[in-house]
Amino acid sequence: MADGALFGPVQSARDDLERRTLSTIHGDLARLIYLASTRDYNSGAYHHEGLAARFGLDQAREALQTAHCNVFRRLVSLSLQGLVGELEAYVNTSRETPAGLIHAWRELEPYRVAVPMEMDSTTVQLFLSNIKLALEVLELRQQQRREGQPASSLQPLLGQ
Amino acid sequence: MGGAGMSAFLGVMAVLALGGLVLLGRSRREDRQTRLSYDRDRRIHCAVAAAFRPGELTARIFSREDRDYIRRTGSSALEILYLRERRKVASHWVRQVSEEVGWIMREHRLRSRQSANLSVIAESKLFFYYAELKLLCGLMLVLVRIFGPHALVDLAARAGELYQRIGRSLPDVLAALGSIEPSRNPAA
């Protein structure tokens, strides 16, 4: 029996989203950015053309919203070291130069719009604060690389 | 001598807790002026927070693991930034716990007025949990500023435990405050 028959169309939409889309994106931070981009800035409603065509508008919306919250919670649960790893993976897969991306993120704080609406304020604060710190750690690494500091000073950070 | 030392210690703790309660009251007044949350948002936040609060979030905020990681970078500027950030988040957590438990108890009080079968023992127990949690929140708010959040792991765990106990004692109140569909609850 298919999952859809067991748990209904929303679960089927979630599975489909996970299988076809999210599993092809590398890293939870990239998934978070992707899921946030499916949300309308003005209404806060999620939309995914393909998913809506297959499962219906509401089901697609709910699947996206749930996935967004789940990915966000996974990121908040990470240690700072884990989050730095996520951020580094995101930076490395981006088309921008690491220095450019870190600079833009520090200045514009675009990650603020990636937060799901349903989260409580402490969780959001922790996430924003951790991203800010992770950016500083990456900036420090960049700086150390530029200054050609001995690898020993980077070792504890790289030893993940 | 031991008795006198204990009395002095308890006195200091009481003063700190009272100071914290004053801070809590002041921050609540400030929040009221700036807060944009509506009743619905409150209910949702409360329910989501209540579902998520057990353990995980508290452990992350007060964790020493992150502090040790930052220390290993060898950057004092980063360490200062980290401590400032964590103090801010920890204080926010304490205020949120205190505020939410206030909503829960207020809702319970309103419901109790219409209830014919109140248990004195259960109500007394609930009141003591509430009083302990409020005092703990006041104390933590002061101690976070003095010692930083990492020294308060056990107090935070105790506060989380009390919050859960109150929530478990009043499932109908929590359900009323958090009337959102289970699928929207990230903990579901």
Image (cartoon, helix red, strand yellow):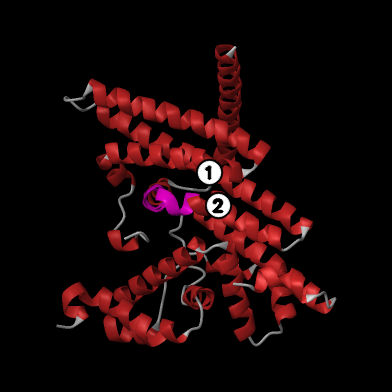
Q: From the viewer's perspective, is residue A138 above or below residue B24?
A: below
Residue B187 locus on image (x, y percent) = 35, 59
Type of residue at label 2? Ser
Classify residue B62 as left or right of residue A5. Answer: right
Asked if badge 1 and badge 2 are on a common chain, one would say yes
Q: From the viewer's perspective, is residue A119 above or below residue A25?
A: above
Residue placed at 45% from the left, 70% from the top? A71
In which quadrant is the N terminus of chain A drawn?
Answer: bottom left
Q: Chain of mark 2?
A: B
Residue placed at 74% from the left, 58% from the top? B78
Q: From the viewer's perspective, is residue A58 above or below residue B70?
A: below
Q: Evaluate if marks 1 and 2 touch, with contact meaning CB atoms under 8 Å apart.
A: yes
Q: Residues within 10 Å of mark 1 (few under 14, many from 20)?
A: some
Q: Is residue A108 visible?
A: no
Type of residue at label 1? Val
Residue A121 locus on image (x, y percent) = 51, 52
Residue B153: mark: 1
Q: Is residue B114 visible?
A: yes
Q: Which residues are magenta?
A: B45-58
Classify residue B158 as left or right of residue B141. Answer: left
Mark 1 vs 2, N-terminal side: 2
Front one among B149 and B74: B74
Q: Circle 2 sits in a helix, a strand or a loop, which is it?
A: loop
In which quadrant is the C terminus of chain A drawn?
Answer: bottom right
Residue placed at 71% from the left, 65% from the top? A136
Which residue, given by chain and number where applicable, does mark 2 sit on? B63
> Residue B108 magenta-drawn?
no
